[in-house]
Amino acid sequence: MIGIIEATLLIILPLVLLAIIYAMGRVAKRKTGREPFASGHKFPSIYIPYKPWWLYYIAFFILWDIVVIFILFMVAEVSIYVIVSLAILIVTMIAYPIRTLRR
Amino acid sequence: MFEEIMFGIKVIVWTFAVIFIAFLTEWFYRKVLAHMQHRVGPKLAGTVGILQPIADFIKLMRKHQLSPEGTDDPLVDFTAIFGLWIMVILTMVLPIFGTEGLIGFHGDVVFVLALLAIASLVYIITPYLFPSPYPTIGAGRRAELYLSYEIPMFLAFAAVVFVAGSLKISDIIYAVTIVKGGIPAGILLIPALIVAVISSMARLKKIPFDIPEAETEIAGGWEAELAGRRLAFFNLLTDMKLFTLSGLIATFFLGGPLGPMFVVSGLEWLLVPFWHAFWFFLKTIIVIYVITAISAATARFRIDQVLRIFWNKLLSLSIIQIVILLVWWGL
């Protein structure tokens, strides 16, 4: 088991090292506001009117699946927790507005 | 205090070592892929091109950093460093030189899966920071892909944890050696292994699951606007992810560092870590080779095909795997 000092070192040291390596890269940017996209043609930057509102659901999904899998992991025998977790899994899978289910 | 200093030195050495291993992984992937496509692959930098990924990294670090007007630059810089940092921390859990990694604690499996989920979120959020259509479309595809592969992959890992009955990686490496009712767990876990390998390919965006970048359709997709040091860091992140995921599959399904050892008495301190590392890297390389072979042999799926594969087939397979294990457990 690692202590608080080790945990702090574990978090800080790689972050600092990577930040130093990143800072060694070239920072200079092109001056123009008209940047080329991947095609190589120059045209003004545009904002996409499309708002990723469903990003919230992805963040929620990440928390949810970690919690459910955690419950699954903790129960190493057939019990009500396993059955309920699988039921939640299937219900949520159907409830998500994924493209295949829109058809 | 001395122990803390030594631990700090270990962390620094580990960080650089794992970056070097990520470069070697990329070289191996490119070389094998080229061989399968009847090409030579990297050959100019170093012997048999082994230094080519490092040369590419340095070249990208020296390039101009393109950034379209309206980009959230500080946040893009942060995600580039943060994503790589997560992967470095993840590799510290891998049991390379023994049955335990640099860090190991009860519940480290959940820690690993949580960090993998956060790393995926980095890939989804970063493209949204650019006011450009290509990354936005790529991020949307990435998110859809993420929702598809996440549950089957977690269930595949859950199957191994179920067999091991522990949340600690140092216990999980012994899961495949458990025999019950005359049937070894390693054989029963083959469906979960298949699910884990295919889901890992989707997580890595390897062909045939490279729809978030799809050069011929959306010009690189999520990484279309990345340039210079940002692209260098995200490329390194992808390489490190390939090594980490292959290492995790080797740990969970192939016994990780376990294998026959030939140890001379008096040299245990040197030979035991050597053999552990040997078996771990051998198994990891086999997994990387399988991933590369599938990538070389297949063409890109459409997004709807991918979703159908994961939600209909692989999710079913992983649930069947859990049921098989429940029956096996009752023997």
Image (spheres, coloured by chain):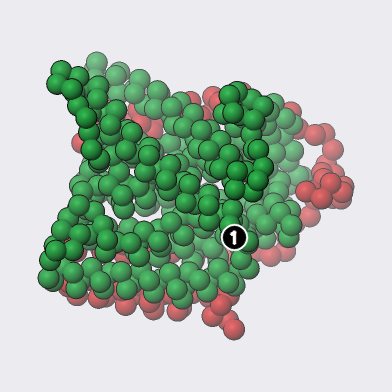
Q: Is residue A58 above or below residue B10?
A: below
In front: A44, or B123? B123
Q: Which image quadrant for residue B133? A: bottom right
Task: Say whether residue B186 is left or right of residue A54.
Answer: left
Seen as rendered, the residue at the extreme front is: B38
Q: Is there any visible trace of residue B213 in the rendered image?
A: yes
x then y, percent, for residue B293: 53, 52
x then y, percent, for residue B197: 43, 56
x then y, percent, for residue B251: 31, 46
Q: Mark 1 belongs to which subunit?
A: B
Q: Is there any visible trace of residue B86 in the rendered image?
A: no
SS class of the residue under badge 1? loop
Image colour assigned to chain B: green
x then y, percent, for residue B16: 46, 26
Residue positioned 40% across, 58% down in the render? B196
Task: Say whether residue B308 is left or right of residue B322.
Answer: right
Disc 1 target residue = B298
Chain coloured red here:
A
**Quarter of the image that includes the C terminus of chain A:** bottom right
Residue positioned 32% across, 33% down in the render? B277
Task: Say whether residue B318 is left or right of residue B329.
Answer: right
Residue positioned 59% across, 72% down in the render? B304
User: Count the marks: how many?
Assistant: 1
Residue positioned 44% across, 62% down in the render? B150
Amino acid type, callout 1: Thr
